[in-house]
Image: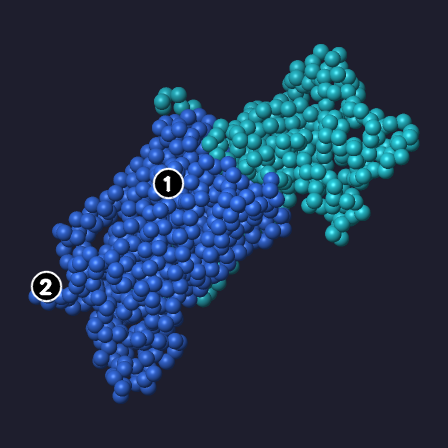
Chain colours: A blue, B cyan
Amino acid sequence: MATLTETPASYESLIVERLDYTPQMLPPREPTAAEDETRRHYLNHDYSLFGWLFTVDHKRIGLMYLVAVSVFFLFGGIAAGLVRTNLITPTGAILELDQYNKAFTAHGTIMLFLFLIPVIPGVLGNFLVPIMIGAKDMAFPKLNLASFYVWFFGALFFVYQLLVGGLDTGWTLYPPYSSKYSHTNVLYAGLGIFITGFSSILSGLNIIATVHKMRCPGMTWGRLPLFVWAMYATSVIQLLGTPVLAVTVVMLAVEKLFGIGIFDPTIGGDPLLFQHMFWFYSHPAVYIMILPGMGVINEVLTCFSRKNIFGYKAVAWSSVGIAVVGFLVWGHHMFLAGQGYYLGMVFALLTMLVAVPSAIKVFNWTATLYGGVISFQAPMIFTLGFIVLFTVGGLTGLFLGTMGTDIHLHDTYFVIAHFHYTMVGGMMFAWQAGLHFWWPKITGKMYSDFWSRLAAIVMLVGFALTFLPQFVVGYLGMPRRYPNYPPEFQIYNVLSTGAAYIQGLGYAMPIFYLTASLFFGKKAGNNPYRATGLEWQTTSPPEAHNFPETPTVYFGPYEYGVEDGLRIVDDLERTAKPSSNGVYATANQGVTSGH
Amino acid sequence: MFAVMETPPILPQSASEFAQQYDLLFWYMMGVTVAGGAVVYIGLIAMCFLFAKRSETQKPMRILGSTKLEVIWTVIPLLFFLSFFVWGVRLWDVAINPPKEATEKEYLVVGKQWMWKIQDPQGLRHINEMTLKINEYVKVTGTSEDVIHDYGVPAFRSKFDVVPGRYTAAWYKPTLTGTYHLFCDQYCGQGHSQMVGKIHVLSEGHFESWQQGILRTADHKRPVDGSPAWQGRLLFHKLQCNGCHFSQSPDDPTPPKAPNLEQLWMTKRELSDGRTISADAEYIRNAIRNPTMHVRSGWKPIMPAYHTGLATENDLYNLIAYVRSLKPGNLPYRTEKSPTPIGGAPAISQDNPAPLPAPKEGGK
């Protein structure tokens, strides 16, 4: 490595103040119209089909994920619409019993395996992680493409199985129902899940390698954007958890195909073994779903309140804490399943512990707003919506993680409402926040301010009204997965269904105004929100290799509050002189590898 | 469609002793979480108003964090969460440990796609209906014939998974008369939502007259039924269990081929592989369904397995009840014929509650 020519500012020191920066509060310099006309970037450097299908550019792969997950979200949404519409009447409005069972299973499995798990890691993670750490691409670009195709074909195969025969086991696939009694495509659907799982493993590996080895000079662990921290924690879970799911699915298949008694008690198996193995993956999987969303929230919240994140270390370590402790709480799904008393007690205690990092995050987000300059564009409305809804989701989770209260609430609509508040109110809103926040960076175009804010509000209201009645009806005792229910519960179901249509309208709106922005939107410029992240210091859309030259980083990711503001890339040469061998100065702390 | 909608309840009825204890914890947690949520919401709203952007030149503060605050909002929630945990475990303790009175009135529920087979302590079987006397402790033991089901009674705040191959249990002490929902809460296939039933809680007088109407009577006017142990005794002969498990008669030199089952219940049993195991319901159940699982030390593993075609879940339960009731001298001889079948003799009345066969004279 090069000799050090200047000590870069450490994160919390005051050295930043004596550096000479162009005020960051002013918009950065934009390319002139003439420059813009001729500029080559990742979208227009190659128009061939081959150039898209076999690209190893992480940004193009991210866009391919975007298209694919959007289509799968539509499928999952249609299934949700069928389920909710059917529940308008106590005897099932439109579907037969079997159809209903297949519809809710399709909704659950598609939304989980084909939308929530891949959406932020696949789209935003792919697009942003390399740019945020100042790298040219992922550590393994070809593996990245491979993991997209593995996921995509696995997903297509899975959806095909749902369409031709269906799956009626619920996403939990509990034997002996799934292994012995279900007449649907358990085996092939399981194969689909098995295949998509490999993509999860490979993507996780790739992100971990990228974060470890590809950070640009000066990008220390203490300066990583919190989105990258969250993606890192998520990847660790994916790498460690997904193989267990794969093994479980294989064991299920072995029992079904060869009659080897693993889970079926009549041939010597134990159905609880499946539940242990399933939740060993599937509980951490809910953190695979929510952690990237939390990462997005950090980025958006700081930008629109012009503030440093409150308690960077607390937020970063709480992600890691969730990832680690999240592995040890799976048994709280099984309190009533007949697992041992002391086992349940350990899981309940750890569940209370894993709730703490989430609470820390919420408090830190709220505190971040203090003393800020807050503007309420669409990404910020989504972010505030996230905090509001996730708080409800998190707090209601406590009722389910407490052994005593879980007795009555287990497998009721209370559970449904709880996890929709975290998964949809949390992850879906974080995804929308992230998509709207980085859309100008991804496409170079700005979407309609009015329509995007309206969509955010419609989604928020629709969502809250859909699931609030479900808490009530859940406490009343309505079990989940019931197409027929006692008539006194009807009013809550009608309310819920009505609001679900409003919510559906909200999800449809971005399709129109975001698509319209591609053709009619005004140019976004490099940094429309005047954000500090490294991804905003390059052009919009970024060029094929992200940066003209490898950037060097001198301070933390959220320096919105420095007196005169900061700009990073353009001032590189003024603050850091190249050393004798032409390499820019590197930080003197942490690992600072790059190409 | 909407005209027929019933007036919706807001809160579920609280119809058992446990439900009252449950609601205490629930509303404590509700209070704490609503207060916690309010702190966050008030904070959010206040920040959004106070620090909304008002001019282009407005400057934000540069605040990096505060260790003191981090500690405060780590420790305070943690303390509350731990209080939930501790109280939750205590409530769980109550839920899973039936009081002594409850164990004397034991119901068996067997889940089956898609119905509940319920056998009451008198041995009478009902489908999807359970009738209870107010203020009487009862224990409910459950198992399943096929997939996993869940026996849930919202008004009692009680719920437990019934798992094939295992016994799980709950207990009730109903405190409010009425008819309550019984739901299957664990997804079990096509008819999951139709695997529902009713729990009737009757006042003492009503319960007596209901029993009069349905129960076998002393004057033999209704079909006679037997207690689980009595039915188990019939099965014991029918399945020829006494071909091996018998007490040696004075005029029959054949030695028993299998262990004597008298006073077996809850004793420690030594197994051939060196383990010691407590002879509870699951042990006896496994000994019948899957005999090679636990072989008694000193005996050959010659016991045949009785699969569901030979002994249903109800049969197993009744056999266990029989084994449990065996006192010294109760175990039949090898050659003993089946006792009087159901429908024949001894009626069980209030005066004669003992459902067990009288000990043989001169027994072992």
Q: Residue at x 62, y 46 (%)?
A: B90
Outermost residue to the left? A34
Which class describes the residues within 10 Å of circle 2: few (<14), some (14-19), or many (20+)?
Answer: few
Q: Chain of mark 1?
A: A
Q: Position of residue A561 (x, y in %)?
A: 29, 67
Name the residue nearer the viewer: A468 or A180. Answer: A180
> Pointer 1 and pointer 2: residues touching (CB < 8 Å)?
no
Q: Residue at x 44, y 44 (%)?
A: A187
Q: Position of residue A186 (x, y in %)?
A: 44, 42
Outermost residue to the bottom? A580
Q: Residue at x 25, y 45 (%)?
A: A455
Please tell me the numbered disc located at residue A506: none
In the image, residue B251 above or below residue A41: above
Q: Position of residue B122 (x, y in %)?
A: 70, 25
Quarter that holds the C terminus of chain A: bottom left
Horizontal relation, residue A28 to residue A128: left or right: left
Q: Are marks 1 and 2 on the same chain?
A: yes
Give the residue pinned by disc 1.
A162
Report helix, strand or loop for mark 2: helix
- The picture quadrant where one finds residue B55 is bottom left
Name the residue nearer the viewer: B336 or A544. Answer: B336
Name the residue nearer the viewer: A68 or B97. Answer: A68
Quarter that holds the N terminus of chain A: bottom left
Give the residue pinned by disc 2.
A37
Q: Residue at x 35, y 55 (%)?
A: A150
Residue A305 visible at all: no
Report helix, strand or loop for mark 1: helix
Among the two numbered marks 1 and 2 on one chain, the one whose residue lies closer to the N terminus: 2
- The picture quadrant where one finds residue A131 is bottom left
Q: Mark 1 is on which residue type?
A: Leu
Q: Mark 2 is on which residue type?
A: Glu
